[in-house]
Amino acid sequence: MESATRNNALVEKLESRSIKPTAMRLLVLEYLVQKDEAVNLSDVEQHFKNSDRTTLYRTLKTFEDKGLVHEIHDLSGSAKYALCADDCSCAYPEDVHVHFYCNSCKKTYCFPDRSVPSISLPDDYHPVSGDFVINGVCPTCRN
Amino acid sequence: MESATRNNALVEKLESRSIKPTAMRLLVLEYLVQKDEAVNLSDVEQHFKNSDRTTLYRTLKTFEDKGLVHEIHDLSGSAKYALCADDCSCAYPEDVHVHFYCNSCKKTYCFPDRSVPSISLPDDYHPVSGDFVINGVCPTCRN
DNA sequence: CAATCTTTGCAATATTGTTGCATCTCTTTA
DNA sequence: TAAAGAGATGCAACAATATTGCAAAGATTG
Ligand SMILES: [Mn+2]
Ligand SMILES: [Mn+2]
Ligand SMILES: [Zn+2]
Ligand SMILES: [Zn+2]
């Protein structure tokens, strides 16, 4: 069946990151998969109106801890999350890509094919990760 | 006198950005000048223990609105501020530089001589500004 | 000086992020 | 299969940060 197959793919996605595929986690993952923009906790809350805020919060944190999603800090003031590519291990700078934040609609988009440029720093600064967010106006808001 | 001269420079700095040089603003500016790292509202509050939080908050916002400081969003969870160079108008990408956030001491440093690399985006994305924060370990925390 | 505009102080509130703990659920094991 | 254990969930409380309304104080201008 359609939905059984899809569900299987989701289960596998979770298990590939050592996350137990509970009902809630599968639903949140499904939500993330079909979104083409990064989501924050409020977004998830509003989509799952009956679910508990804390569970959703911890679901996202678990996803992040296990490397299934990456966290994005843009100018919106709340942390957003987006799915990592299957082969992503968030290694810096190769695996880390640029994000675009729209000042108008407040949406944040991933640019998986634009990995962050590597910046040379003084020797005694040891980079571990990086966040590069470009702010501006997105195609939809261009008018 | 020493302090009169210094004070004059501070007044000029404010006036060059069309900010009225009130007592509080001069003090906050003086504080920012002598800091070599970005500061958040709590930092300022703790330094000016008797001053009102809101006034300090609005002072920083005013400074930002007038282009005297730039706001930095790092992984610390609170917005930080740092003085702009005299000739900075925060134009992207030329005037915007890279920041370094230390995961250990939570301090954020400006790298004024490393302007953010310009990233090519699809034509219909219109960049206006950018935030590039590199996270890692700073020289002091290296041990 | 009076009128006006800006800044400041205080209080209240909004928003986001986080934790403790009891309960539930699923899996393991005797 | 029953008991034990581990992990997930739900609820409540709380912490931290950001923001606003409004009245009083201060500065500016004619
Ligand atoms: Mn992304
Ligand atoms: Mn800076
Ligand atoms: Zn937009
Ligand atoms: Zn450090």
Image (tube, coloured by chain):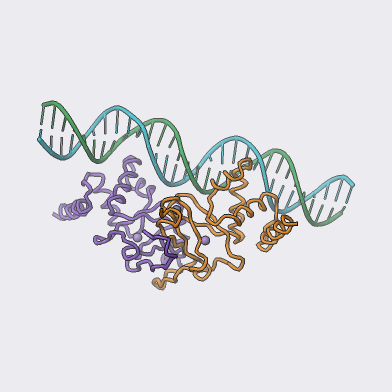
Chain colours: A orange, B purple, C green, D cyan
Q: In the picture provided, is B129 more to the left or to the right than A3?
A: left
Query: Residue B124: x and y, percent?
Result: 42, 61
Above or below residue A122? Residue C18 is above
Looking at the image, which residue is at 29% across and 52% down?
B31
Q: Quadrant of residue C29?
A: bottom right
Query: Residue C26: x and y, percent?
Result: 77, 51
In this view, the residue in front, D21 or B33, is D21
Query: Residue A47: x and y, percent?
Result: 59, 45
Q: How many marks?
A: 0
Can you tell me which quadrant of the image ligand 2 is in? bottom left
Q: Quadrant of residue A121?
A: bottom left
Above or below residue A89? Residue A77 is above
Above or below residue B34? Residue C18 is above
Q: Quadrant of the N terminus of chain A?
A: bottom right
Looking at the image, which residue is at 41% across and 67% down?
B119
In this view, the residue in front, A73 or B60, is A73
Q: In the picture provided, is B7 more to the left or to the right than A86?
A: left
Looking at the image, which residue is at 26% across and 44% down?
B24
Query: Residue A107: x and y, percent?
Result: 48, 53
Q: In the picture provided, is A115 more to the left or to the right than B64?
A: right
